[in-house]
Image: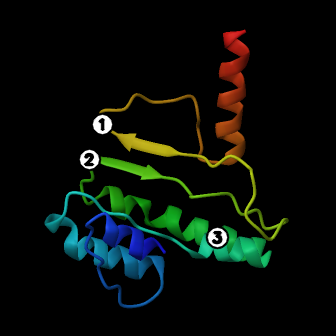
Amino acid sequence: MYREVSKLLGMDILEVSGGSIGDELRTLSRNFGDYDFFYLHVKKTDSYGEDGNFGAKVGVIEEFDSLLPEITGLGVDVLAVTGDHSTPSAMKSHSWHPVPLMIGSEYCRGGEVADFSESSCLSVIWGSQRRLK
């Protein structure tokens, strides 16, 4: 589905040799100077959530986290990290839970969140709503 939507939007689909996040990153690195925008999809966080495999889901997230310095080292202007939906391992399905969004750029101001998690982002949302009352 993601590939077809990307094609409809006029995006080129780059072939990745292998199925790891590292393989995707190598493809990104090789082609970084040729495009203005990249969309990198890490499917395993979703599929491991659907399988109820909490440990494997954590492992994929940690693997991605470890590769973030390589991505930012490419000289990206803006980096957005998010999900298309929540897939808690305990529920083994997609859910209504909020999805955190992290945006990094030299043009963005820093926020109050010290780490990227549902709980941290939720505390800022609820804290902001409390301050508005």
Q: Which residue sits furthest left? A: 34
Name the amino acid type tagged 1.
Glu
SS state under label 2: loop
Relative depth, front residue between 46 and 23: 46
N-terminal label among 1 and 2? 2
How packed is label 3: few (under 14 Cα within 10 Å), some, or many (20 or more)? Answer: many
Query: Coloring scheme of the render?
Result: rainbow
Callout 1 secondary element: loop
The residue furthest right is 90
User: Which residue is depicted at the point 49% across and 75% down?
Assistant: 1
- Judging by the rendered image, the residue that carries numbered circle 1 is 106
Question: For residue 73, which quarter of the picture?
Answer: bottom left
User: Mark on residue 46?
Assistant: 3
Q: Residue furthest front?
A: 8
> Which circle's residue, 3 or 2, is located before the other in the chain?
3
The answer to whether marks 3 and 2 mark residues whose Cβ atoms lie closer than 8 Å is: no
**Mark 1 near mark 3, Cβ–Cβ under 8 Å?**
no
Kindly report which numbered mark, 1 or 3, lies closer to the viewer in this rendering. Answer: 3
The span from disc 1 to disc 3 (Cα, nearest Å) is 30 Å
Q: Is residue 84 left or right of residue 124?
A: left
Q: Amino acid at mark 3?
A: Asp
Whether pointer 1 and pointer 2 mark residues with C-beta atoms closer than 8 Å, the reply is yes
* x and y, in percent, of residue 90 in the image: 85, 65
Residue beneath disc 2: 77
Q: 72 or 127: which is nearer to us? A: 127
**Rendered location of residue 43, percent (x, y):** 55, 74
Going by the numbered disc 2, the residue's amino acid type is Asp
